[in-house]
Image (tube, coloured by chain):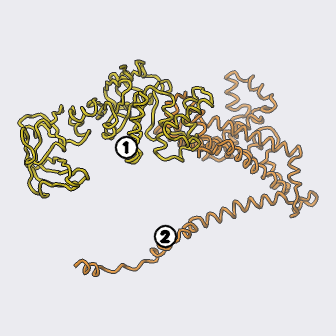
């Protein structure tokens, strides 16, 4: 397995702002790699550093071993699918897709034939003569994909490509993108702020926060062994207990997190469990499950998620009444900081 | 309890006159449109379309050379006169100048506008806007006369090229048939320079506005797909900004076509369409021929626009 993209102590500063702060990272050839984080966390800047739209202030970026810092985007073996698609409004769909080949000097017949093939692949065979403005968001997204893939890049960069689509379409496109990546076998580097999206598609995920990477791991590992409180909270829901609360609860001053679905009313659990008395504040009905907000120690609100029975919430108590929570000791995820 | 409190609630107060007017407008969108457009549309129809129609009609009226009277007999004689060598020369001379001025303005304006849009930030952006607009605040006549001083034999331009050792080159330029003249002030080149100076802002502003509307990510996408800077310029920036160039060239072209002051003050003798119109309607009183001369730029601009449309200049709009 060779390294497709390598960051070595890369920083990107804008005046005093460190958009990307001393990042080192190896992205393996052929993997679906996601950069996950809230807005302003440095994930998009990192992607733009790979594409060449930004230059690192310090550090080295290698693409298949070749130093990329200082190379303009047109001399890099990567292609990008932009967040708002960036289709050329004055060209029809076919010319948009064939653009990269036209620049390479591929003959008209040849490039149109291959552009038609790409459009077939993204199921837009009939749309070649349309203008981008006459397409829906999902269709534009597919055109952008075809336009980037026609150059057969070894690395495809995707900058929140599904951000503007509605939920159903987004889920459908997630499945298609993953299948496409598997079929083509090329490296996808995918930027998103949606943890569900990152989890469902990726081989590995890098969690960004404030210009730094908090953790790089496969989705399951990220969920089950979050390195930091930020990761625990950002990837899935988590009840994070700081050192002080941990000390009161379990006699050990180390921060930990518990997933809401691991918590139960005390009566339902036996064995090595932690019990906490509290007061039920609110019940949120979510269809398959319900979420129960419970106040413990008169200050901290803990979320507990219980499956619904026959479609109905099974409240352990009335709202406002006392309830004791419990969770297995091994459900506690120790956190670094 | 509920119903009691509801029925006890105070009656809705009657609507004021203004509110009733608002309701009437809300219910009749057509009335709203009539209020919005009525006056400007009337003005437009009477003053613009009306005067153009009168102009067109005038150009078919008959002018009696002997009595110097205009009669309403329709004739094509005025247009036939346009084709006489002397008059046709005027049309051609003006056309060539207008084309040259438009082309030069576009070439000068594009990089400047591009810099203003893509690179200038903060005070620099403001500075360039003001610098482009500033000449338009000064009187046109003053600027043109100022140029006669600049271009004169003992003026700054003359002094500069003499000191740069370019005297011979300029003297040689002055001997060329389409550029030359006795001196810079009386040369075609001098007239061209002044025209370009005067109308350049009218090219910069629309080109700048068009470039402003080209999203940066299109340039990045082009570069990402392998385009060099020159290729991105040719395939993305130029086609998207071209409507702005066309808009600007309509200004520079038609303003040059209609101008009658610069040709009088700077450059060799030889009338322009504008000066011909001025002479015909002023000192001679041949309104029909003046009208026919005025129709020429209108027709040329119309042809130019339809040509630009066929070339796809407005596809990006």
Residue at the image position 61 percent from the left and 43 percent from the top: B244
Q: Nearer the viewer, residue A248 or A96?
A: A96
Helix, strand or loop under label 2: helix
Instruction: Bin the neighbour count of mark 1 within 10 Å (Cα to Cα): few under 14, some 14-19, many 20 and up.
Output: some
Q: Colour of chain B?
A: orange
Q: Position of residue B258 (x, y in %)?
A: 74, 48
Q: Which quarter of the picture shows residue A320? A: bottom left
Residue B218, compared with residue B39, is above or below; it is: above
Judging by the rendered image, the residue that carries numbered circle 2 is: B26
Instruction: Bin the neighbour count of mark 2 within 10 Å (Cα to Cα): few under 14, some 14-19, many 20 and up.
Output: few
Q: Nearer the viewer, residue B160 or A118?
A: A118
Drawn side of residue A309 relative to residue B122, left or right: left
Question: Label 1: chain?
Answer: A
Question: Label 2: chain?
Answer: B
Q: Position of residue B238 (x, y in %)?
A: 60, 36
Chain coloured yellow here: A
Residue at the image position 36 percent from the left and 78 percent from the top: B12
């Amino acid at each position: 397995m060779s390294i497709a993209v390598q960051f070595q102590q890369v920083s990107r500063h804008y005046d005093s702002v460190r958009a990307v702060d001393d990042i080192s990272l190896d992205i393996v050839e052929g993997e679906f790699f996601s950069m996950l984080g809230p807005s302003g966390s440095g994930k998009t800047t990192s992607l733009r550093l790979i594409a060449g739209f930004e230059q690192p202030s310090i550090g080295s970026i290698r693409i298949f071993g070749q130093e990329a810092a200082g190379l303009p985007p047109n001399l890099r073996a990567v292609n990008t699918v932009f967040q708002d698609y960036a289709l050329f409004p004055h060209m029809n769909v076919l010319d948009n897709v064939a653009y990269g080949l036209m620049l390479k000097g591929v003959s008209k017949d040849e490039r149109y034939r291959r552009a038609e093939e790409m459009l077939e692949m993204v199921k837009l065979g009939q749309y070649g003569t349309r203008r981008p403005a006459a397409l829906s968001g999902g269709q534009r997204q597919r055109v952008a994909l075809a336009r980037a893939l026609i150059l057969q890049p070894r690395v495809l960069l995707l900058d929140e490509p599904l951000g503007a689509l509605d939920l159903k379409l987004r889920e459908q496109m997630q499945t298609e993108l993953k299948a496409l990546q598997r079929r083509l076998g090329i490296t996808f580097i995918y930027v998103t702020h949606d943890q569900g999206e990152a989890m469902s598609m990726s081989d590995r995920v890098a969690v960004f926060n404030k210009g730094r990477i908090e953790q790089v791991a496969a989705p399951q590992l990220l969920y089950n062994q979050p390195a930091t409180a930020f990761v625990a909270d950002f990837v899935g829901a988590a009840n994070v207990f700081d050192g002080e609360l941990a000390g009161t609860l379990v006699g050990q001053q180390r921060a930990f997190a518990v997933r809401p679905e691991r918590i139960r009313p005390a009566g339902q659990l036996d064995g090595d469990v932690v019990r906490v008395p509290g007061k039920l504040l609110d019940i949120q009905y979510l269809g398959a499950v319900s979420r129960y907000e419970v106040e413990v120690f008169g200050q901290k609100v803990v979320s507990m998620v219980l499956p619904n029975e026959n479609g109905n919430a099974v409240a352990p108590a009335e709202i406002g009444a006392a309830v004791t929570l419990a969770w297995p000791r091994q459900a506690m995820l120790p956190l670094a900081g | 309890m509920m119903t009691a409190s509801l029925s006890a609630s105070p009656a809705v107060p009657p609507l004021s006159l203004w509110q009733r007017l608002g309701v009437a407008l809300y219910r009749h969108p057509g009335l709203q449109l009539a209020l919005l457009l009525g006056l400007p549309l009337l003005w437009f129809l009477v003053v613009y379309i009306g005067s153009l129609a009168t102009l067109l009609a005038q150009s078919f009226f008959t002018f009696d050379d002997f009595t110097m009277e205009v009669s309403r007999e329709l004739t094509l004689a005025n247009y036939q006169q346009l084709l006489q060598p002397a008059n046709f020369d005027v049309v051609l001379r003006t056309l060539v100048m207008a084309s040259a001025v438009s082309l030069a303005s576009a070439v000068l304006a594009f990089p400047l506008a591009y810099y203003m849009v893509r690179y200038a930030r903060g005070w620099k952006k403001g500075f360039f806007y003001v610098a482009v607009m500033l000449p338009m605040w000064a009187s046109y006549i003053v600027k043109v006369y100022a140029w006669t001083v600049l271009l004169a034999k003992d003026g700054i331009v003359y002094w500069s090229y003499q000191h740069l050792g370019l005297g011979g080159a300029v003297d040689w330029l002055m001997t060329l048939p389409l550029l030359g003249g006795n001196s810079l002030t009386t040369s075609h080149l001098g007239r061209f320079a002044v025209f370009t100076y005067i109308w350049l802002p009218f090219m910069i502003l629309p080109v700048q506005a068009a470039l402003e509307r080209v999203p940066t990510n299109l340039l990045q996408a082009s570069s990402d797909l392998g385009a060099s800077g020159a290729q991105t310029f040719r395939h993305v920036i130029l086609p998207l900004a071209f409507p702005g160039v066309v808009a600007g060239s309509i200004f520079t072209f038609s303003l040059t076509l209609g101008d009658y002051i610069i040709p009088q003050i700077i450059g060799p003798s030889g009338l322009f369409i504008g000066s011909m119109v001025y002479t015909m309607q002023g000192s001679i009183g041949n309104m029909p021929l003046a009208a026919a001369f005025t129709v020429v730029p209108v027709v040329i601009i119309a042809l130019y626009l339809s040509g630009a449309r066929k070339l796809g200049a407005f596809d990006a709009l």
